[in-house]
Amino acid sequence: MKLLKNSAFGFFILFIMGGFTIIKTHAPSELVWYEWNEGVIKAKREGKIALIDTYTDWCHWCKVMDKNTYTNEAVIALINKEFIAIKFNPELDKKYINGTDTLSGRQLLGALSGGNSSGYPTTYFYLTKKSIMYQEAGYIEPVKFETILRGIVAEHNKL
């Protein structure tokens, strides 16, 4: 009987520890980010909105937005459901496909902004169903960003 008690206690401890391990290792939901060339094609193919996070490595507010806004659970859930999220750093030495054109990062930034870049971070929303581009300049805190996202989704889904 003593062996059974010890075994039962041991299983109980393993069960509890296993439960805590699952809780500790369960990763919170994360945004799925794409590069420009892949993300734009995916957004068009799926009829989703392309959310283009334009940033630079040296931009303080870009890092704050990554840390605060893009880690918010409500923001993550909404973006992953309705958008294709694209990270775009125009200062990188890469080539970007836009339609039939191959552009540098600076050229693509000019195309996105209509030649009126507004600094970093800037979030562009390309509504693939309507071929319309919207932009929001600067850092946007999570609650305001969620409101903006919902408005963009509503606009995208209007007939």
Image (cartoon, grey):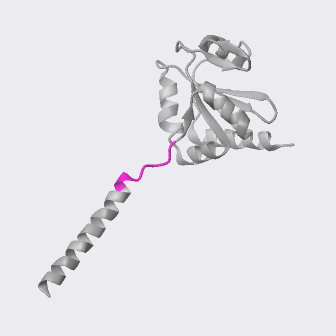
Identified at 74% across, 39% down, the residue is: 47
Is residue 48 among the parts visible in the rendering? no
Give how far across and how far down residue 42 sits, in percent.
Answer: 66, 35
Identified at 26% across, 73% down, the residue is: 12
Is residue 132 among the parts visible in the rendering? yes
> Magenta-highlighted stretch: main secondary structure?
loop
Identified at 36% across, 58% down, the residue is: 22
Position of 110 relative to 39 (above/below):
above
In the displayed structure, does residue 14 sit left or right of residue 27? left
Inspect the magenta stretch and tell me whether residue 147 lies in it: no
Q: Quadrant of residue 115?
A: top right
Position of 25 relative to 20 (above/below):
above
Identified at 69% across, 35% down, the residue is: 43
85 vs 149, nearest the viewer: 85
Inspect the magenta stretch and tell me whether residue 29 lies in it: yes
Chain part drawn in magenta: 24-30
Quick one: which residue is furthest to the bottom in this view?
1
42 vs 115, nearest the viewer: 42
Quarter of the rendering occupied by the C terminus: top right
Give how far across and how far down residue 114 sits, in percent.
Answer: 74, 16
Quarter of the rendering occupied by the N terminus: bottom left
In the displayed structure, does residue 98 sit left or right of residue 35? right
Position of 154 relative to 124 (above/below):
below
Give how far across and how far down residue 117 sits, in percent.
Answer: 66, 15
158 vs 61, nearest the viewer: 158
Give how far across and how far down residue 14 sits, in percent.
Answer: 25, 67
Position of 151 relative to 107 (above/below):
below
Q: Give the total number of marks visible in the rendering.
A: 0
Quick one: which residue is furthest to the left in this view?
2
